[in-house]
Amino acid sequence: MERATATPPRSVRLAIRGAWLLTAILGVSVILMAIFDDQLAGAWARHHTGAREVFEQGGRAGLERSNFAVPSFVPVGVTMFVVGVMLVFVLAVFLRLGYRWGQLGLIALVLGCVYATIALGFVLEPPAVFVVVAVACLLVEGVTLVCLWHPDTRAHVRGPWVGGPGVESEQPVAGDRVPE
């Protein structure tokens, strides 16, 4: 089941590096969530009636004493980081081998990151450090998307139906029906 034996084009290598850089930024964000936990709770409280006043008087502890269910951001962030690492690992392997679904999967993942970056980094008004991380993340996401849609990347992931990897070989590709 050999697909692409040559070294992938530079755009593919850069796209994969960009995806890994996004996971690193997510890891840094999780660490920042743990450090700025109270400030994130304050940003959350500003958008909830009643919670704002309680937070201004007693902080996070005041919210918990007043029976507000303050969201815990760190466990969600850690889960997102672990899932992100696993997805990038699998999708990058298949993109490197020339499978289109590796490219499309990474594009979908990066577009989801763009949405989350805008929503969490700007709309919810987090502490300033998260805005800086969001701007850096948007830059990496943009470069990664450009690399994923670059003509060299698209040529690398062409399937056997258009003369891409796997066409020259007489070996059946996974999923091909083998004549009996």
Image (cartoon, grey):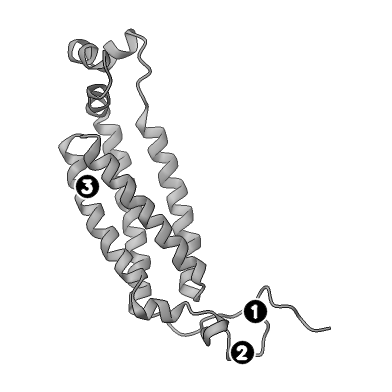
| Pick the front one: 26 or 70 | 70
Residues packed near mark 1 inside 10 Å, few (<14), some (14 to 19) or many (20 plus) = some
Residue 142: % across, % down: 27, 61
Q: Is residue 86 above or below residue 152?
A: above
* Element on which disc 3 rests: helix
**Is the C-beta separation of discs 1 and 2 under 8 Å?**
yes
Q: Amino acid at mark 2?
A: Ser
The residue tagged with tag 2: helix, strand or loop?
A: loop
The residue at which mark 3 appears reads as: 133
Local packing at callout 3 (Cα closer than 10 Å; few below 14, some 14-19, many 20+) is: some
The answer for how far apart the CA atoms under marks 1 and 3 are is 42 Å
Q: Which label is found at residue 169? A: 2
- Answer left or right for 9 relative to 28: right
> Which one is earlier in the sequence, the residue at label 2 or at label 3?
3
Task: Determine the residue positioned at 23% across, 11% down.
Answer: 54
Q: Residue at x 35, y 21 (%)?
A: 70
Contact between marks 1 and 3 (CB within 8 A): the answer is no
Quadrant, the N terminus: bottom right
Report how far apart the C-alphas of labels 2 and 3 lie in the structure. Answer: 46 Å
Q: Residue 59: x, y in percent? A: 23, 16
The residue identified by callout 1 is 173
